[in-house]
Structures are given as structure tokens and as C-alpha cells.
């Protein structure tokens, strides 16, 4: 359950931080304001896990686009990864993709050129389990999925309330049940946005990993810039109903707009009504 979430406050904060709708309903979308929501889940043996939340996630992002002035294409076809196709998009959103994202190295090369040209990237939940054998993809996303304990409720803490993906969220909130992802191969420059204290998780194997590696602040969401691109990732969002939760919607929307270059970080210290001082 979310603590102290006020939808009217959210709406006012959205106006303050520049996340209000960009145009009236029915206005034509500028072609440069379009994103690709990519959902491929593939393993050669067909045994890879496919999330049942993909449709709900895509529908939620389509609604964000309608409300905030950007177009949304949805595909699970890796043939979209060509230079000519990708140049239409301001950001690529890997929305609960998993396992093999691409069918060949030419598609991987097109993805890499897109990032190097300044493209935006967003990963949602199991996107960190895509391309498990390609270290460039891990570097773009910022880490690689390792495992997770059973679904459960856990307390999430905001570490940077100034970012568009966390601005206006409660300083802490109870979340779940959800899969609390453990990652490894973290990029050194990631900037955590949401964290969890592993000590509070019900996991008989947590002493093995993550152990004390992260202290009381294991990253669940982060952003960074890598190889010319802007990248945001969140581990939240295993269950269908969560894509109607204002916390997750607000969080993903801010991450998408930041990756698109449509919502910038403030130049100076941020002031947030949800911010508290850590003791």
C-alpha cells in the first residue's frame, strides 16, 4: 500500500515539474516525439519466462503518450532494429522484454549506433534479463539481472527526489507484492533513484547475495548517461495491476520523458514536498 499518496498533489506536482500534457487531445504529434515500446521475449528452446504484464505495461505507456504529447509504437519484432527505423524514435522502452532481444548482430549494431547517436533508453522490470550474453547491453541498462526472492511486500526509499522519475513521490512507500530484483555487473556511474534494504527481505539466501554488498540501499531504479545516450531503469512492475498504480505510472513517465530529453534535471538544489532528511 502506498503511504500518503494524494492524486491531487500528484497532479499539481506534475504541473510544477513540467510533466503536464503537452497538447490538447486530438492534436497531431510532432514526428520527432515518438518512442518505441519493445517487448520481445525469446529463447531458442521456448522455455524462457514471458511476463503476463506486457499488455498492461504497453497500454499504460500508450496512455502516457496520449496525455503528455508523444507517440507510441509497440513491437516485439527485432526487424525494427535498423538505422532508418530507429531514427524515428526519441527513446526505446524495453518493456518487460526478456532473454534474446535481438535476432542477429546487425540488429545489435543498430541498437549500439542508436545509443551512440544520443538516443534514449528505458528498461522496465525484466528488461534487465534481456541480452544476458552481451555486455554492451548490460552497460547501457546499467546492470544485469541475477535473481529474485519470492514475491513479497517491501519498503522502497527515494534517494534522489529531484529526478523527473522520482519528483513528487513519497520519500518512502510500501510496495508489492512484487519481485525484488537482485542485479550484478553494475555500471560504475549509475545514480540510484529507488533503493531497498535487503535486510528486510524474506529470502533465506540473501546472506550469499546481495549480502552486505549494498548496505541498506540496494538499487531498484537508477539513471545514467552511457556512450552518448540517456538511460533509465526500474525493477518495479511484475504484476498487471501495478500499471494502474499512480506511483509506478508517475515513476515510469518521468523516466521516459527524461530519456527522451523532454524533462531535465534541475540546475540547482531541488525542493520537494515529499523529501525528508535522512538521519
Image (spheres, grey):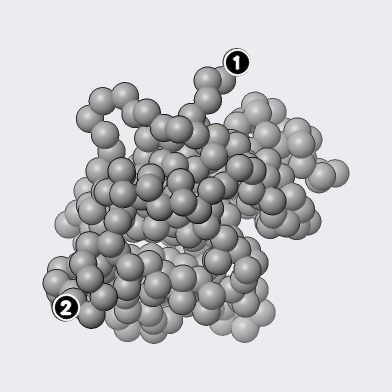
- Mark earlier in primary sequence (1, 2): 2
- Name the residue: 39% across, 81% down: 75
| Residue 278 percent location from the top left of the image | 56, 20
Q: Is residue 186 visible?
A: no
Residue lying at the far top of the rendered structure: 279
Q: Secondary structure at mark 2?
A: loop
What number of labels is visible? Answer: 2
- Name the residue: 41% across, 41% down: 167
Q: Secondary structure at mark 1?
A: loop
| Residue 273 percent location from the top left of the image | 45, 33
Nearest the eye: 47 or 242: 242
Residue receiving disc 2? 28
Left/right of residue 47 with respect to residue 245 in the rendered view: right
| Residue 140 percent location from the top left of the image | 37, 52
Task: Mark 2: give few (<14), some (14-19) or many (20+) Cα within 10 Å.
Answer: few
Q: Quadrant of residue 224?
A: top left
Residue receiving disc 1? 279
- Name the residue: 60% across, 63% down: 242
| Residue 262 percent location from the top left of the image | 23, 53
Amino acid at each position: 500500500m502506498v503511504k500518503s499518496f494524494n492524486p491531487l498533489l500528484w497532479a499539481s506536482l506534475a504541473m510544477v515539474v513540467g510533466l503536464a500534457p503537452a497538447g490538447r487531445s486530438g492534436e497531431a504529434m510532432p514526428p520527432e516525439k515518438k518512442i518505441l515500446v519493445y517487448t520481445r521475449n525469446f529463447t531458442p528452446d521456448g522455455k524462457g519466462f514471458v511476463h503476463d504484464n506486457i499488455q498492461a505495461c504497453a497500454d499504460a505507456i500508450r496512455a502516457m503518450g496520449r496525455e503528455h504529447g508523444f507517440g507510441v509504437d509497440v513491437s516485439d519484432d527485432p526487424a525494427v532494429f535498423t538505422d532508418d527505423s530507429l531514427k524515428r524514435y526519441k527513446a526505446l522502452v524495453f518493456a518487460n522484454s526478456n532473454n534474446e532481444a535481438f535476432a542477429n548482430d546487425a540488429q545489435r549494431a543498430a541498437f549500439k549506433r542508436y545509443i551512440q547517436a544520443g538516443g534514449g533508453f528505458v528498461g522496465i522490470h525484466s528488461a534487465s534479463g534481456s541480452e544476458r550474453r552481451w555486455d554492451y547491453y548490460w552497460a547501457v541498462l546499467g546492470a544485469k539481472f541475477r535473481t529474485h526472492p519470492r514475491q513479497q511486500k517491501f519498503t522502497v526509499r527515494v534517494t534522489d527526489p529531484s529526478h523527473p522519475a522520482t519528483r513528487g513521490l513519497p520519500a518512502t512507500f510500501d510496495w508489492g507484492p512484487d519481485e525484488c530484483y537482485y542485479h550484478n555487473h553494475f555500471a560504475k556511474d549509475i545514480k540510484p533513484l529507488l533503493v531497498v534494504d535487503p535486510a528486510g527481505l524474506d529470502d533465506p539466501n540473501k546472506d550469499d547475495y546481495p549480502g552486505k554488498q549494498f548496505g541498506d540501499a540496494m538499487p531498484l531504479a537508477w539513471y545514467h548517461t552511457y556512450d552518448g545516450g540517456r538511460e533509465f531503469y526500474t525493477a518495479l512492475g511484475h504484476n498487471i495491476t501495478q500499471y494502474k498504480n499512480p506511483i509506478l505510472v508517475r515513476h515510469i513517465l518521468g523516466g521516459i520523458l527524461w530519456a527522451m530529453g523532454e524533462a531535465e534535471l534541475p540546475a540547482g538544489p531541488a525542493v520537494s514536498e515529499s523529501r525528508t532528511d535522512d538521519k
